[in-house]
Every structure is written in structure tokens, then in C-alpha cells.
Amino acid sequence: MLSAVTLTPVHRTAGALLLLTALATVISVVARLSADADQPTEIASLYAIGAAKAAYATGGAARLVGGIALIAAAIPLRRVMEPYHPRAIGLAAALLAASGIASAVSGGGAIALAALAPGAPSSIILAFENGDAGGAESILFAIRWATGALGFTLAGLALVALASAQWRVGGILRPSAVVVAVLGAAMLFIWVDAATVVHRITGVGFLIWLIAAGLWLIWPGGSVRRPEPHAPAVRK
């Protein structure tokens, strides 16, 4: 049997931080898309960033805030879920915190790129630009991309670990644990360039998970179920 336990401030703190991460993620994506910085070459991307410094910097700042929020959410989330599967939730919390660190670094890299990017040249000059940006800008491009992909990978691994603890909660969370595990595994395809469609689907899926988990943890009057302690073994 599983007994119900009323949600506490710790539950709601974890939920609020997950929702903040989701909000920051949405702002980051929208701002980056509006900057149109994903160009074929680093030079072209750099000039695109220079033409939309405010938007790109806003996206980077939002990513930084989202990373910090995810780091902060890992601690109360571990306290909430630890009774169900201590090892799995400990690993999941550590991976989420590491994901937050990587995402924050990626956001900081984007802010730095916005600060260094020059103004946009004429369309004729831009059409003949090729190759890498070179210097500090090229390094920042590599850091921003690698840490962003690493953060997404670590978040996927965290979901796989969290799914086993979620299974033990039971109720509606049991069937959804399978979905979470599949989503987490699919997020690992971020390193495969050809899997662009998968990237978009898993990105939306992770955002939905952040919102669903956050709302579940802060819902007024809600409750979660926890395993009853095992009875001590009787010696014969």
C-alpha cells in the first residue's frame, strides 16, 4: 500500500524552480530564433548576432537564469523523491544540477558573443564571407554549442534515472514514467546532426516535462504517495 502525504513547501519550491526553468527556456528559444543567429558559417552567425545584439543577449541571459534555476531545483527535488528510490533520485538530482551548470555556461557564452559581435555588414559582403570567425569568438561558439548539447544530454540522463523513482510513486506517474524514460533516451540524439527533427521533438518534450512536473509539485491541495516502511524481518 502507498500512503498519501500532503505537499510541503519543499515540494512547492522544487515545482516553482522547475516552472522558472521552463519559462527561461521559452524566452531563450524565442529570443534566439528572433536573432536568426544559426547561419551556415561562424562569420555569418557573428554578424547576425551583431545585428540583433539585444535579442541574442536576452536569450543567453534567459539560458543562464534557467541553468541556475535547474541547479537550485535539484536539491528540493531530491528531498521530494528520495523516499521512493534513493540511489536513482540521487543520481537524477546530480545530473540535473550538472545540466544546469552546463546550460548556465552556455548562456554566459551567448552573452559574451553578443558583446563581441560586430555590427552587420552589407548583404553583398556577407554573401562572400566564409569560414570560422577566428580568435575568441570561435572559441565562444564552440563553448556555447558544446555546453548547450552537454546540458541537454545530462538532462536526458537525469530523466532516465528519475523514471525509475517515478515508477515507484505509482498512480498516474507509473505509466508516465515510461514516457519520461523514452524521452530521456531520445534526448541523447542531440549529438547526431542528422536527427534535427528528433532534436525539436525532444526539446518540446523536455519543456512539457518541466511544466508538468512543476505544476504537479505546486498544485494547491495536492498530494503525493509514498511507500510505507517495510516491516522488520522476523527471525525464526
Image (spheres, rainbow, N blue to C red):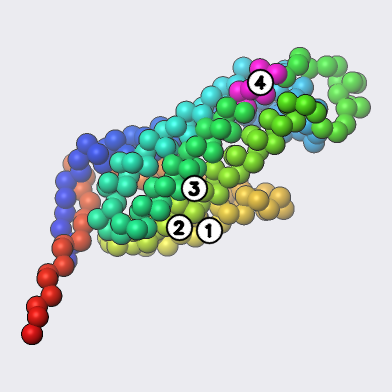
Mark closest to the chain's N terminus, 4 or 2? 4
Of mark 2 and mark 1, the one earlier in the sequence is 2
Q: Looking at this view, name the residue that lies furthest to the front.
A: 235
Residue drawn where x is 50% and y is 42% of the image: 99
Q: Residue at x 62, y 50 (%)?
A: 190
Kindly identify which numbered label has been placed on residue 114.
Answer: 4
Q: CA distance from mark 1 to mark 4?
A: 33 Å
Identify the residue position indicated by label 1 in the image. Answer: 185
Residue furthest to the top: 119
Determine which residue is flagged by label 2: 160
Spatial CA distance of label 4 from label 2 is: 35 Å
CB under 8 Å between discs 3 and 2? no
Seen in the picture, residue 68 relative to 51 is either above or below; the reply is below
Q: Earlier in the sequence, mark 1 or mark 4?
A: 4
Amino acid bearing label 3: Ala
Instruction: Please state if 227 lies on the left or on the right of 213 as rendered.
Output: left
**N-term-proximal mark, 4 vs 3:** 4
- Image quarter (top left, top right, bottom left or bottom right) of the N terminus: bottom left
